[in-house]
Image (cartoon, rainbow, N blue to C red):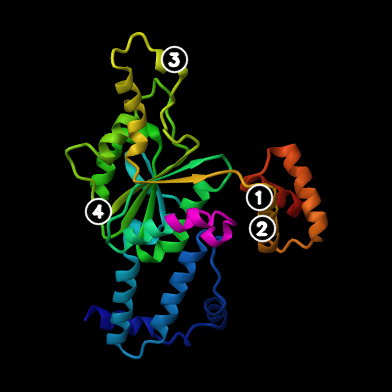
Amino acid sequence: NDFKIIFKMFNTDFSCLTLLQQNLINNFVPSKPVINQELFDISRSLQNSLTNCKDVNEFYDTLEKFFLTYGVGKFGLNKAFRYENNEICPIIHIGNGRLDQLIGYESQKKILTKNTEAFLSGKKANNVLLYGDSGTGKSSSIKALLNEYYKDGLRMIEIYKHQFKYLPSIIQELQSRNYKFILFMDDLSFEEFEIEYKYLKAVIEGGLEKKPDNILIYATSNRRHLVKQTWSDRQDQDEVNINDAKQEKISLSSRFGVKILYTHPNRQNYLEIVDGLAKQYNLQIPQEELHQKALTWEIRYGGFSGRTAKQFINAMLGR
């Protein structure tokens, strides 16, 4: 009965309105800038589908399918979140990058997507550590997963290491949701005096409470073993069991079942990235001139990397 009323309201004839009011309705534009274009497009698609419904049953089925696919509330209407003020809050401004826009690193992306797709399909999947050189696309690869798999129920929570002590509370809130969550930890590393990694170790594997099947941890780091090690560790006169101390420091990274290495591209790969980005942004410059400028930029601003290539293209677009 409720849907009969809603269906009738949705199909009400507004021809009785004044010409000015009709013009406002027929030429509706958002009153604010569109922040999340994908969600805006999804909402418009729903509106069009409802407009084409012939009866209340079709109207009901369309809404039911929509909410089964995208859900409701903050987890249904947003892709990414962060933990602040003791609650999970949506991140409104997020990038629209996709994996195919990340040029190169095909084998790395294949491993990452295969693990993620297994996770989304309800199969067993591993926590993932992306490690290696800076500026090579580790963080971009993980963030691109949101745009690839949002419609499949993937959501991402950004967690900082000073918040690791709240991980049990965060997991408790997420475990009963009908979504798949990736806890994203960017630029993860620890100095010798930082002990937050112990909370993370317990959550990943080792605590009494089982980590829910709808949660995985994806992290990036420039270090493979995450916890800083020094030469003095090998000659520690205070530690009786030196090997135990070393194992303590590398035990965190061993809890990530999949470890993916990202290294700096060589000269040719760097230029391929530059060419790909120039094509994406429709930058009209002869290739020979583009390569010459890109190599000059690389010498001045930090070596061969995807980040350097992106910064170079940004500079060219700004001229």
Please rate how many residues cluster around mark 3, counting C-alpha atoms within 10 Å: few if below 14, some from 14 to 19, many from 20.
Answer: few
Query: Which residue is under mark 4?
Result: 213
Decide which of tag 4 and tag 3 comes sooner along the chain: 4
Determine the CA span between mark 2 and mark 4. 37 Å
Circle 3 SS class: helix
Camera-side mark, 4 or 3: 3
Name the spot of residue 2 as percent of width and height, x first.
24, 78
Q: Was residue 102 drawn as part of the magenta stretch in this picture?
A: yes
- Contact flag, marks 1 and 2 (Cβ < 8 Å): yes
Name the spot of residue 312 as percent of width and height, x first.
71, 48
Decide which of tag 1 and tag 3 comes sooner along the chain: 3
Query: Which residue is under mark 3?
Result: 232
Q: Was residue 122 drawn as part of the magenta stretch in this picture?
A: no
Q: Amino acid at mark 1?
A: Lys
Circle 1 SS class: helix
Task: Decide which of 215, 87 is in the foreground and name it.
Answer: 215
Tell me the residue at 24%/53% (across/down): 213
Query: Which residue is under mark 1?
Result: 310
Please rate how many residues cluster around mark 1, counting C-alpha atoms within 10 Å: few if below 14, some from 14 to 19, many from 20.
Answer: some
Query: Which residue is under mark 2?
Result: 277
Q: Amino acid at mark 4?
A: Asp
Residue 8, above or below 217: below
Tell me the residue at 29%/39% (across/down): 167
Q: Amino acid at mark 2?
A: Leu
Determine the CA span between mark 2 and mark 3. 45 Å
